[in-house]
Image: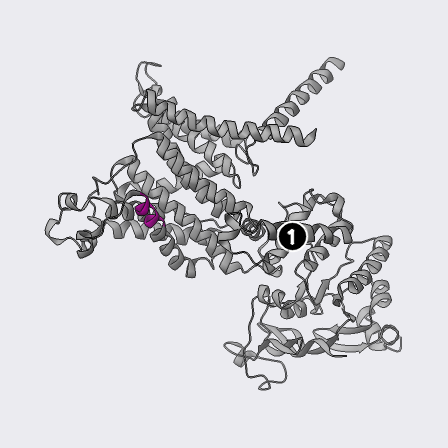
Amino acid sequence: MKTKSKAIFKTIDIVLLLAVLGVAIAVDAFMPVGLPATVLKKGAVFAVVAVSMNLLNGFTGLFSLGQAGFMLLGAYTYAIFSIPLEARESVYYMQDHLAGFLHVAELPVIPAMIAAGLIAAVFAFLIGLPVLRLKSDYLAIATLGFAEIVGAFAKWDTLGPITNAPNPLVNYPKFSKVTTYFIVAGVCIAIIALLVRSTYGRAFKAIRDDEIAAEAMGINLAKHKMISFVTSSFFAGVGGAMLAMFQSKAQANSFTTALTYEILLIVVIGGIGSLSGSVIASFLYIACSEWWLRFLDTPDVIPGLTRNGFRLVVFSAVIMIIVLFFRRGLMGDKEFSTERLVKGSKQLVRNLQDKRKAKEAK
Amino acid sequence: MNNLLKLEDITMQFGGVVAVNNLSLEVNEGEIVSLIGPNGAGKTTAFNVVTGVYEPTNGRVSFDGRAIVESYPHGKMRKAYAGENRGVYKKRIVKTPDKITKLGVARTFQNIRLFKSMTVLENVLVAMHMRRKSNLFTATFLLNRKEEKEMRRKAEELLEKVGLLDVKDELATSLPYGKQRRLEIARALATEPKLLLLDEPAAGMNPQETDELTAFIRSIRDEFGLTIFMIEHHMNLVMDISDRIYVIDFGKLIARGVPAEIQNNGVVIKAYLGVSEDA
């Protein structure tokens, strides 16, 4: 009986997953342009980055704020290698001084995305060697500093022949369909989920729970922190490439610390230590900030109060309310499943009934 | 009998404080040896040196005939060193705790350190991670299912032996105190040690629980062919279970011997009760 209901719940979970893909296909078919498509694309991108950040912050307990830096590395790597050779001279402002390899190196979309992840991972490895010895806030400060430095380097004139300095990189191939975004994001998230559920994931959680005990149980702290940091950065790099596609231009200005904070906010709202929480929160966050609250920006909703930018006031208030009522995020450290949803709502109904009964008894 | 663990002239100095002073001791294979002493005598510090948490200021630790930790006064300590046997040790061998665990030294902690967000079973599985054969790739992409299954089977077997199988899916921290202690020992056993270091295993236990623990420690020693080195304050437990006892006070060894000798040793009584010998 119990195993049977478990199987049913599992089937429903899979059906739900397919339904999500169905939504993407439907949006592609019936309204390829417009807010819903935009929200779904951006949501998918943010979901990848939020999940990668959660791997590091939520599962390994390493408080890092370097996400924007690794995304920038990913975005630039993707753009640099995937702009078609013949389009390059028109993209770069120093047309005659392109770096030599730019005249020959061109990668198709998927290899370029993998390269984006790899470059971010290599930088994570190098920066991780000194930085991962630091704990909590100090690690956050160091990684934040790294992200700022990467941003500054991307804008540096001397690197102009490669990065186009402060000017945007454009004209690279982009995913046009929501479905493509969803599939790529899904693959990335699935890999992270598998990693978290493996024996390595248990080692990460052990480090988060108690570093001293984890080390005494034979877990090599330096190695496992590095694995988590490099993997997280790899997917931040891929996410950066996807964001570059979404924005149609790669420019250092759009990978600021504010971007890291947005992702951190998503991770916190979704629940630190819950991958599904990060995914759900990404879509809710993007939908709220880009779509559902848009109407507040029109002056005549509440005359004298609503105006351009007012939505951000309401949005901030909504976030505060969520954080007040869901102290551990929407999902806590649990993962979403139909089984939990059903059991949870049953429990909720039971609690309400108990309360009512208690009231009647009085 | 060959000695499994050997400490030679271990001195651990923090700034001007000498926490462990020229401590030498041996633990032979198959023995249960206790390290006792008043609060602050340096017992846990000695454990931390053996397990690689601290690098000693001077001295050598050998395990299974091989030096695993060795150091001499260097850096600031070159001037500040206040201990003995300077110049005897010339090498520096420093291993992180995980490397020492891998050699076959497992430990428990004085203040229980379980992984609090994990279930009982997961706590044991974490300790098995070290001996895995899978790598990051095979583990992530589920190519190690056989090993994972084997790990779970072994973990459950271990939990059954320590009597925790029925609570394997509960959160480790939701267990009552005595069971948490047992789980810590089970977790240490999962690293497949030759030597088990127990830091005050009976702390906070009532007399009945202590008796159970005594039998439990004996049984795991026999079952797993272990050598046990422990710190303990419960004198009944120590006298009952130990083959030999070392007593330290202010970091220095003040007595050694079998339980009967220690019980009647005037120096030990003085250290513990703070009375003069003729009082």
Instruction: Tell me if residue B109 can be seen.
Output: no
Instruction: Tell me if residue A197 can be seen.
Output: yes
| Residue beneath disc 1 | B150
What residue is rendered at 52% in x and 40% in y? A272
User: In this picture, which residue range is highlighted in magenta?
Assistant: A110-117
Numbered disc 1: what chain?
B
Name the quadrant containing residue A263: top left
Name the quadrant containing residue B239: bottom right
Mark 1 is surrounded, within 10 Å at the Cα level, by few (under 14), some (14 to 19) or many (20 or more) other residues, namely few
Q: Quadrant of the C terminus of chain A?
A: top right
Q: Amino acid at mark 1?
A: Glu
Q: From the viewer's side, name the closer residue of B150 and A209.
A: B150
What residue is rendered at 40% in x and 54% in y? A142
The secondary structure that most of the magenta stretch takes on is helix
Q: From the viewer's side, name the closer residue of A168 and B145.
A: B145
Q: Left or right of A154: which side holds B36? A: right
* Residue B148 picture location, percent across and down: 61, 50
**Can you say whether A213 is above or below A36 in the image?**
below
Q: Quadrant of the N terminus of chain A?
A: top right
